Amino acid sequence: MSAEERRESVIRAAVVEFGRAGYAGTSTAAIAKRVGVSQPYLFRLFPDKRAIFLAAARRSVERMRRRFEQASEGLAPQEAHDAMCRAYPPMIADRDDLLFQMQMYVAVSAREGEGDEEFGAEIRALWAETWDSIRDRLGGDPQLTRDFFGIGMLINVSLAMGFPEGHRVWETLDIFEQLPASGGGSEESAG
Amino acid sequence: MSAEERRESVIRAAVVEFGRAGYAGTSTAAIAKRVGVSQPYLFRLFPDKRAIFLAAARRSVERMRRRFEQASEGLAPQEAHDAMCRAYPPMIADRDDLLFQMQMYVAVSAREGEGDEEFGAEIRALWAETWDSIRDRLGGDPQLTRDFFGIGMLINVSLAMGFPEGHRVWETLDIFEQLPASGGGSEESAG
DNA sequence: ATGGTTAGTGATCGACCAATAACTTTCTTC
DNA sequence: GAAGAAAGTTATTGGTCGATCACTAACCAT
């Protein structure tokens, strides 16, 4: 397998492992094991653990942005909002990816504590890109943007904490039923 | 100093340290250093690291709940909502506490990976209490509750990621200016 | 087939970390 | 002032982790 292909599979494994245990809680050995290579080989593909995490962050955030963009392609603000709401459930069905993004948010402060400020800067830049993109799709409407991200974050947190389906926390979050004509949440699998 | 007093100061230090580096990223030595005691002494006050984190979680979440309850005491749903929105800025001025809560959300999956399911159960229970309390104050209104928590979570995430004041991400989140008559965000310090 | 490039491994190392055990100091009470 | 409890320390240990080094195996062009 080429180095580039290996790097891709490392990134995929990193999203899973980092998502479950966080930056500090994930050993490079755990990632290597999931990839199916030896632990030292990771350091041929990436300079250090930090770089693996950042590569995973880039991949995860950009994928999210792309999916929202595809879902809202060419739609007016309110329709774009509804379309992106409908696009969200199949996205968070990939729990590993969602957990990784949560870990990404909190990893910033830890890295800053180690004197690594570029880490946070890169993650903020990635996320701000998504913010801008979605904001544009929503016609720059502040309230739509805020509500969309707000509810999204609340869903993320509730999922990360592991509230089971049917828990009263979810009562207010069934965004399907509050939207005009949609297919419901039957789709699965993230491409 | 009595053991009980020491335990309190350990909890305070734990919120700060865990908040900055997460569960796995925080050493018991770092907590002990902040408290001003030797590292092994922590294990006289608490059975293990996990118990320190859970004690900090209890303290942090219950304090938040109490503050929201005080702010909305005896008010009708919409007024309670506005009052709690106004109460939030001084609360998140304590960045350590906010970061800790973010770390708390993501710590669940990591502990589950270690076979510790009670950890998540306890944190969910703590948080669900707060959810119920606030939901009641908002008259059980699903939309008010969802929006309140949603915007709160978005603020939390944006702060955790370290977006500086004035960044365009904050444009939509200035909840002060969207509320009727408030004191603004001049208050500081968390009692 | 041979020389070089690329993919990949085993061994190891210094640092760190949670937790235990054994010991010392300080306060309290009779 | 002696006894005992409560507060607190030093030393240590078994284990883990990120990273480096030296080495091997497969592929490829000449």
Image: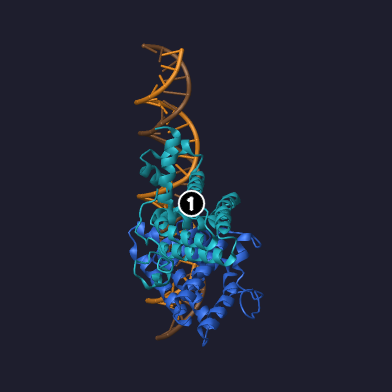
Chain colours: A blue, B cyan, C orange, D brown
| Residue at the farthest bottom position | A74
Instruction: Name the residue at 50% across, 42% down.
Output: B48
Give x and y (percent) for residue C19.
Answer: 50, 40
Give amino acid for label 1. Gln
Count of numbered circles on the image: 1
Give x and y (percent) for residue B145.
Answer: 55, 63
Judged from the image, the secondary structure of the residue bearing numbered disc 1 is helix
Give x and y (percent) for residue A24.
Answer: 45, 57
- Pick the front one: A109 or B183: B183
- Pick the front one: B34 or A44: B34
Q: Is residue A97 left or right of residue B29?
A: right
Q: Which residue is mark 1?
A: B70
Eyeballing the image, is B4 above or below B153?
above
- Pick the front one: B66 or A91: B66
**The C terminus of chain A is located in which quarter?**
bottom right
Instruction: Name the residue at 39% across, 32% down.
Output: B1
Is the residue marked by circle 1 packed among few (<14), some (14-19), or many (20+) residues within 10 Å? few
Q: Which chain does the residue under circle 1 lie in?
A: B
Among the 4 quarters of the image, the one containing residue D8: top left
Q: Is residue A191 visible?
A: no
Eyeballing the image, is B176 above or below B72?
below
Q: Is residue B111 visible?
A: yes
Instruction: Name the residue at 51% across, 73% down.
Output: A148
Give x and y (percent) for residue B59.
Answer: 48, 47
- Pick the front one: B60 or A30: B60
Eyeballing the image, is A22 above or below B36?
below
Q: Is residue A190 left or right of residue B66?
A: right
